[in-house]
Image (cartoon, rainbow, N blue to C red):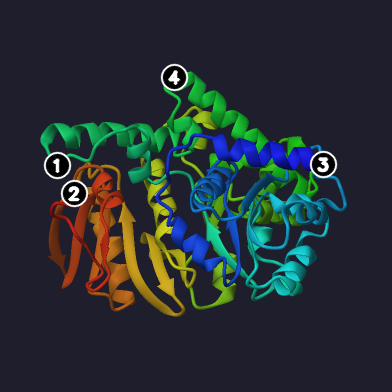
Amino acid sequence: MELVFEEWNTYAQKKVLKTRAIDLERLESNSHLKIIAITGIRRSGKSSLLILLLQKLIKENKNTAYINLEDSRIKNSIDVLNDILKWFGDSGYLLLDEITNVHDWESWLARNHELLKDKLYLIVSSSRKKLVVPSKPLRGRMLPYELYPLSFKEFLKFKDIELEHTTVGIGRIEKTLGEYVIYGGFPEVALTENKTDKIRLLNSYFKDIMGLDVSEMAKENISTVDIFGRYIIESPYFSASKCLNFFKSLGHKIGKQSILNLEKYSQDGYLFFFIPIFSRTIKDRLQYPRKVYIGDTGFMNALSGKTDMGRLFENTVFLELKRRLSLKEDIHYWKNSSGIETDFVVREGLNVKKIIQVVYKMEDEKTMKRELGGLVACAKEFNLKNGLIITKDVERAETIDRIKVQFIPLWKWLLTPINSSSDEYIIDNCIHE
């Protein structure tokens, strides 16, 4: 077994990788306080992040090891974690990839974090959210980090595209944005040039996530999980009752609780996100359909063959919000009794912090009136002074019924830092590094 450990450690030290926009120093320093738990959808780069951290620590002459616990030669061993500790020792940085695959991982982490405090620093990963919602022994010991596929800024760096504030430079960025929203941000897909190969990779990722994560967690057969996944990709809103009716129309026997389990576990695997309506009552949040977002926009085109730029733009904004928001913040959508809707309401506790509408194209006056009306009505309900509309190419600001509305192109918003003091988006010179 030690040979397997040595193989993974040697592999990690030699692996050549592109960097991510992750603060490795912060991960290292925080591991002195808590167990660092990195979660996220499969193939989003968790293993690469651990390897990049290992390479940094090795350069600093710190005792460090990386082991991938999905390796079939070791994951079924009951004592694999103890064997690793015997091999590695009781001090240094131990990086354990996909730790939720092995026996008794929660108790082992809790025990060794307590017994070897200030000596052994544990940094672990898993494609399952279970890692950051642990059982009682680990509560208070974990510091979670959620990793998503590449942000647009990371995507540009992976493609070696410089951020140039020129007409030609902006045109190149806008063209690259089209590739980003259609094929998504998985690192390997980003580095693959052939479009057919991109689709092939995305289909294989989807199959792996459904089979290795969702199906296993939900204890449902692959065909049921696959039908559910393809249904969700076609549906901007989710209702368990409507999904159940869909299964019945196919002659497929399944209970409502099984549908709810698939919803839960597909979200725990970061494949889908189900966003509730904003309401201060639990009844409303459960009664109204949830809006559906996909863990990577590339799955929509790869699985359905469709390119709905409106949904892709909105999904891209959602994933970027997930990267930016703090652990205390939540995302909802808003709708009033007249059916007027706002795409994103970001709240912290009971306080609404910002509202965002996403519109691919302001094609006509009717569309403009509907989208503006939704944002302004939402702002008034929550006593906000401003709102944001993210578009394909509109950039301006206007005041409607004393609500300041900023319009900004998606590419610019994705590359723009947020001014925390005013909570407004910096429009001028936003792409300068």
Between the residue at mark 2 and the residue at mark 4, the CA separation in whole angstroms equals: 30 Å
Q: Earlier in the sequence, mark 2 or mark 3?
A: 3
Taking the spot 23% from the left edge, 69% from the top edge, the residue there is: 386
Q: Nearer the viewer, mark 2 or mark 4?
A: 2
Which residue, given by chain and number where applicable, does mark 3 sit on? 1
Q: Amino acid at mark 3?
A: Met
Q: Earlier in the sequence, mark 3 or mark 4?
A: 3
Residue 150 in view (yes/no): yes
Q: Earlier in the sequence, mark 1 or mark 2?
A: 1
Q: Earlier in the sequence, mark 3 or mark 1?
A: 3
Judge the density around disc 1: few (<14), some (14-19), many (≥20) Cα neighbours within 10 Å. some
Which residue, given by chain and number where applicable, does mark 4 sit on? 194
Discs 3, 4 touching: Cβ within 8 Å:
no
Furthest-right residue in this view: 78
Discs 3, 1 touching: Cβ within 8 Å:
no
Residue 404's disc is none
Discs 2, 4 touching: Cβ within 8 Å:
no
Between the residue at mark 1 and the residue at mark 2, the CA separation in whole angstroms equals: 7 Å
Q: Amino acid at mark 1?
A: His
Discs 1, 4 touching: Cβ within 8 Å:
no
Tell me where residue 427 sits by quadrant: bottom left
Q: Earlier in the sequence, mark 2 or mark 4?
A: 4
Judge the density around disc 2: few (<14), some (14-19), many (≥20) Cα neighbours within 10 Å. few
Between the residue at mark 1 and the residue at mark 4, the CA separation in whole angstroms equals: 28 Å
Which residue, given by chain and number where applicable, does mark 2 sit on? 432
